[in-house]
Image (cartoon, rainbow, N blue to C red):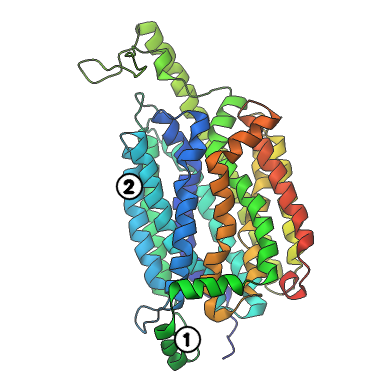
Amino acid sequence: MEKRKLGFWEIWNMSFGFLGIQFGFALQGGFMSRIFQTLGADVDSIPGLWIAAPLTGLLVQPIIGYLSDNTWSPRFGRRKPYFLIGAILASITLLFMPFSPVLWVAAGLLWVLDSSINISMEPFRALVADKLPDEQRSYGFVVQTLIIGIGTWIASNLPWLITQLGVSNEAAPGIIPLSVKIAFATGAGVFLLAIIYTLITTKENPPEDLEKFQREKKESRFFKDLWQGYLEMPSTMKKLGVIQFFSWFAFFTMWSLATPALTEHVYNAPKPDAKLYAQVDAENNVLFNTEGKVDFLDVQHKNEYQEKDKAYNTAADSTGSAMGIYGLSSMAFALLLTFYTSKNKINRKFIHMFSLIAGGLGFMFMFYATPSNLYISFILIGISWGSILSMPYAMLSSSVNPNKMGLMMGLFNMFIVIPQIIAALGGINFLYKLIGTEHIYAMILAGICLILAGLCNFLITEKQAISD
């Protein structure tokens, strides 16, 4: 059955749920490291605390993709039940995340949050391929990227905006500021409402041959089909995997270490260590007085800590706001591509190549950036982000079996999560320290990785993947 071409608003409606997903993803990416630091994490231990996110993706996405491939209900559809389940779980977790009393609770909630986001996100990728004909695939993924860019920009600016409205961004040692708590609660509401909007406005297509679908569903076995998917993995997917490896290593480095690196290097306002200003026990744990408050050495040390902590929280708000610019930039990039791809073919390979190299240069510029021009870095990074969210999926969707789109998208995700796992297990700390000891060198490492990812596009030679 030939798929009909969809209009802009039909594609917009079916992709709108990604606004909510990106609210959750941007709050996670922009502010989890801040929460970890507030709860006492050492900067070099932060990538390890993030390991829950990629491990979750490695386990969850192939399973959800497989399940959604084998789901069909005339009432509930194929992908939509998974959107809703993920949205409910993610919204609940976002509400509780900034109230984490200790570090291990925050790390555990990150695991739950990323699992929930993955439950919603994987079927959205497959939905675009389900509903659109080949010639509209690039257009569909670009519209999706446009919505992601809007979500990234707004969500990344939420703590800053809430602070500007008069809500305090200061708190006692070990306590998450109220501005961050309100931002996460807002994200929870947007996540759920955006998903519900897509559920209401989008109708899914039934399988082309329902009897064959039901028969294959009865015969399907997850591990057998998963192994068969590995065996059937097209060469384009493997080559894209190399590009994805370097791309996602770079962005995981940014999400986990941009806040400490930029607050230190660009804003000169690192997170103060409460142990240097307060009474500690024999095991170097901060002591509390009878009122449950930190027992500072004296009034002078208390005032000094509070002054430095205020500077850090202001710098962290500014860093989050600056990171939001990459969402705005990716949105503008996607908007241009939306207009162009609606009527013209594009060379996905070269667009992706030059976009990734631009982002790499943006990371490099961070070393020289000041608070007034840091936005330049994130404009360039946004171009690469906009491409990462659209071009690889457009190239991939033209190369795989449409009946196994969910499973293959899930398998493709391993090229996203494996580099993040390697990064979290010490890859970032080992490699950036080969360049320099300051945390800003982690951003230089991210830049090198993105440039390598861009050059790896020369591996892509299949005409169907390069141009739609």
Q: Nearer the viewer, residue 249 or 265?
A: 249
Residue 115 % position (x, y): 41, 56
- Compared across the picture, whether 185 is left or right of 146 comes to left
- Compared across the picture, whether 348 is left or right of 194 comes to right
- Above or below, 76 against 451 in this view is below
Q: Secondary structure at mark 1?
A: loop
- Compared across the picture, whether 335 is left or right of 285 comes to right
Question: What is the number of the mark on residue 207?
Answer: 1
Mark 1 or 2, nearer chain start: 2
User: In percent of the image, x 57 and y 25: which residue is there?
Assistant: 264
- Residue 6 in sight: no
Residue 234 % position (x, y): 66, 72
User: In percent of the image, x 43 and y 12: which residue is there?
Assistant: 304
User: In percent of the image, x 60 and y 29: which residue is there?
Assistant: 439
Q: Secondary structure at mark 2?
A: helix
Considering the image in quadrants, where does the N terminus appear? bottom right
Residue 456 lies in what quarter of the image? bottom right
The amino acid beneath tag 1 is Pro
Q: Nearer the viewer, residue 367 or 416?
A: 416
Q: Nearer the viewer, residue 186 or 425?
A: 425
Residue 417 % position (x, y): 54, 54
The amino acid beneath tag 2 is Leu
Question: What is the number of the mark on residue 358?
Answer: none
- Above or below, 313 against 83 in this view is above
User: In percent of the image, x 39 and y 57: which residue is there?
Assistant: 116
- Residue 413 in sight: yes
- Above or below, 7 against 164 in this view is below
Residue placed under numbered mark 2 in the picture: 95
Residue 342 lies in what quarter of the image? bottom right
**Mark 1 vs mark 2: in front:** 1
- How crowded pointer 1 is (Cα within 10 Å; few <14, some 14-19, many 20+) is rated as some
